[in-house]
Image (cartoon, rainbow, N blue to C red):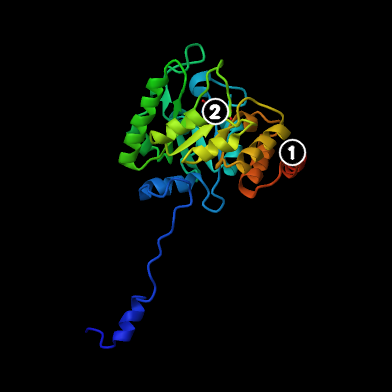
């Protein structure tokens, strides 16, 4: 029977409350489709807007790197402290329990080893496999200024197109050749090219001078790689500076899994990234956790 009381009807439909429409929390991501946003929201914590990605994909071109000889033994205990695991499908399928609650960023480029020219990569994973593996993003290496610059850029744009079809974001990983200068000017160029051509977020390296110009000129979020192992206090300082200068997180490998205490280090990095802890406080946390363990 239809409602006779018009006021009741208005109440039920909250006719006085306009439907809200929230802006998406991540830089440059507001116009993305729902699936893309949902996946990015599994990588970046919506509360802090940041991410701690644990990068363990090094084996795809350099074999069993120090600290990654046994991922089941050395890395699985760190998994609970990461927001995201960045890895290959081989390690995902063989080692990572399928009931993990962590988001997965799947390495999808490859094809060369440290014995050859590294920039000579192709796409090495089919988008359908990324879908099957429930990847939250796909990572493609881009070699700006490298010997195979063009191919690597086209690898990325192909993945962006395929990812858009299925709602999976693409992370462009800027790789720097051994003899190339790593400065803000280079990273402004590299990150901007990746973003202009469709990358949904970009991984780069931190540089001590003018890093804020790199994050400012890139219209999508930037995360920093850790790079070669440096002393723990320096790595925490680097992560802190990057976050304060506009990075949306870290995609850190060696400076976590090669630390004297990887479990303490990943928690200290989390404190810097998500809680804006100073490097001094984070180092104190690192030492406390490390000493508790021994
Ligand atoms: C390898 C990668 C690594 O994931 C990246 O370099 C991050 O690891 P690290 O912090 O050890 O540099 O993309 O090509």
Real-space CA distance between mark 1 and mark 2, rounded to the nearest whole angstrom: 38 Å
Estimate how packed mark 1 is, as few (under 14), some (14 to 19) or many (20 or more) residues with alpha carbons within 10 Å.
some
Residue at image position (39%, 45%) is 36
Give the quarter of the image for residue 122.
top left
Disc 1 or disc 2, which is closer to the eye? Answer: 2
Spot occupied by residue 120 in the image (x, y as percentages of width and height): 42, 16
Q: Measuring from the top left, give residue 252's x and y in whole percent.
A: 58, 33
Q: Quadrant of residue 11?
A: bottom left
Residue found at x 69% / y 47%: 277
Residue 38 percent location from the top left of the image: 42, 49
Q: Quadrant of the N terminus?
A: bottom left
Q: Secondary structure at mark 1?
A: helix
Image mark for residue 290: 1
* Front residue of this view, candidates 58 and 247: 247
Which quadrant of the view contains residue 264? top right
Q: Residues within 10 Å of mark 2 (few under 14, many from 20)?
A: some
Name the spot of residue 94 as percent of width and height, x first. Answer: 47, 31
- Mark 1 touches mark 2? (CB < 8 Å): no
Q: Is residue 234 above or below residue 101?
A: above
| In this rendering, position of residue 2 left or right of residue 220 | left
Confirm whether residue 139 shows in the render. Answer: no
Beta carbon of the mark 1 residue lies under 8 A of ligand 1: no
Give the residue drawn at x 75%, y 42%.
Answer: 280
- Give 1 or 250, whichever is nearer the viewer: 250
- Residue situated in front as seen by the camera: 235 or 246: 246
Q: Which residue is mark 2?
A: 185
Classify the position of ligand 1 by quadrant: top left, top right, bottom left or bottom right: top right
């Amino acid at each position: 029977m239809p409602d006779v009381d018009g006021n009741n009807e208005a109440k039920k439909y909250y006719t006085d409350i306009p439907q809200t429409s929230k802006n998406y929390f991540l830089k440059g991501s507001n116009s993305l489709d729902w699936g893309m946003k949902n996946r990015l929201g599994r990588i970046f914590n919506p509360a802090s807007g940041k991410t701690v990605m644990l990068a363990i994909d090094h084996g795809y071109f350099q074999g069993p790197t120090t600290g990654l000889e046994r991922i089941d033994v050395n890395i699985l205990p760190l998994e609970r402290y990461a927001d995201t695991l960045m890895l290959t499908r081989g390690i995902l399928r063989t080692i990572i329990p399928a009931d993990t609650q962590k988001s997965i960023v799947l390495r999808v480029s490859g094809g060369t080893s440290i014995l050859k020219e590294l920039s000579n990569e192709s796409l090495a994973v089919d988008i359908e496999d990324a879908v099957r593996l429930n990847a939250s993003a796909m990572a493609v290496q881009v070699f700006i200024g490298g010997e195979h610059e063009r191919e690597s850029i086209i690898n990325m744009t192909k993945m962006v197109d395929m990812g858009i079809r299925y709602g999976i974001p693409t992370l462009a990983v800027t790789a720097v050749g051994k003899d190339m200068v790593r400065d803000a000017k280079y990273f402004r160029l590299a990150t901007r090219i990746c973003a202009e051509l469709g990358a949904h977020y970009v991984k780069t390296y931190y540089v001590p001078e003018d890093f804020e110009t790199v994050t400012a000129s890139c219209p999508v979020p930037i995360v920093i790689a850790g790079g070669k192992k440096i002393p723990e206090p320096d790595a925490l300082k680097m992560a802190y500076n990057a976050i304060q200068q506009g990075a949306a997180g870290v995609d850190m490998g060696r400076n976590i899994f090669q630390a004297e205490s990887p479990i303490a280090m990943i928690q200290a990095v989390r404190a810097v990234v998500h809680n804006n802890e100073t490097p001094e406080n984070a180092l104190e946390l690192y030492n406390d956790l490390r000493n508790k363990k021994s």
